[in-house]
Amino acid sequence: MPISAPALFAEAQAAIAKLEATQMEQIRKAGELLANAIMQDGVIQVFGTGHSKAFAMEMASRAGGLVPANAIDMELLFLRQVLPMSLWHSPELERDPETAKLVLAQYDIRPTDAFIIVSNSGRNGSTVEMAMRVKRHGHPLIVVTSLAHTTQVTSRHPSGKKLYEIADIVIDNCGPYGDAALAVEGQDYQVCAVSSITGALIAQGLTAEIIGCLQRAGAEIPVLISANVDGGDAHNEALRKKYAGRIGGGVGA
């Protein structure tokens, strides 16, 4: 099929169908684990580098999403002048294990918090190091990755481990090796990525499972309302006060 929107839609629909057929049990288990963290006054800490940041944006500070979900962002290292701006676009930043230590130090992480770490390749030093630190401190860890990709590459972490090998629960985003889905005739590369599409569904699926668990337990459901709905700001501000300093910008925000 020629490169086209219908061709991409077909590939994306196939990936979504595979996701639904193979990953629902993992998403359900992860939702239960994360709901339990919230009921113990924990925050869901979500980390991804590169385009995996989109997953954190789906989980945190999102209309219809959960207040106790925090996006951990490497950019805070530049905003707080921990690192020079010359490194802003450096690929070495996500490959360096030391980055994880620096990033985590910017946030108020508590024992009841649970983590989601997202990486399509699951090989880079910062994400693997963060996963290892998270587990050493006893936090539950959910990993979202492409098993088709990560099982075909080597780790960039000194331990030789990849992200999925450290997780309590692994959710496969069902994307192909290299992420791009459409072959270009006469070329050795493919185009049009799908991990953002399946990643968004996983993120919203986790949100739905968490809320379902909270509902069945009779627990408070701390959900954000769109700031563009009348009364949304007042509703959201009241809920955010409970998690002041723990969500939306790190320590001292």
Image (spheres, rainbow, N blue to C red):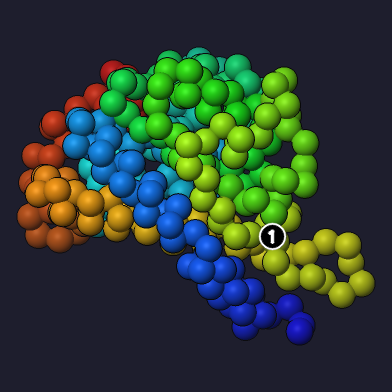
Q: Please say whether residue 7 is visible from this viewpoint.
A: yes
Q: Residue at x 87, y 75 (%)?
A: 185
Residue at horizontal 92%, vertical 72%? 186
Where, by quadrant of the figure, is residue 156 drawn? top right
Please indicate, yes or no, whether residue 89 appears anywhere in the rendered image. no
Quadrant location of residue 113?
top left
Tell me where residue 215 sits by quadrant.
Answer: bottom left
Going 53% across and 73% down the picture, which residue do you hit?
A: 17
Q: Is residue 22 above or below residue 250?
A: below
State the count of labels: 1
In the figure, 64 relative to 150: above or below?
Answer: below
Is 121 located above or below residue 5 in the figure? above
64 displayed left or right of 201: left
- In the picture provided, is 155 more to the left or to the right than 114? right
Q: Quadrant of the C terminus?
A: top left
Could you classify mark 1 by the number of other residues whose Cα lies within 10 Å: few (under 14), some (14-19), or many (20 or more)?
Answer: some
Q: Amino acid at mark 1?
A: Pro
Q: Position of residue 11 (x, y in %)?
A: 64, 74
Viewer-side residue, 147 vs 83: 147
In the picture provided, is 178 more to the left or to the right than 109? Answer: right
Residue indicated by mark 1: 176
- Front residue of this view, candidates 86 and 68: 68
Q: Secondary structure at mark 1?
A: loop
Q: Where does the image place residue 161, in percent across and percent down from the top left? A: 68, 29
Task: Locate residue 53, reporting x and y percent.
Answer: 50, 44
Residue name at image x 72 percent, y 46 percent: 151
| Residue 79 position in % (x across, y down) | 45, 24
* Placement of the N terminus among the 4 image quadrants: bottom right
Q: Would residue 120 appear left or right of 144 to someone viewing this image?
A: right
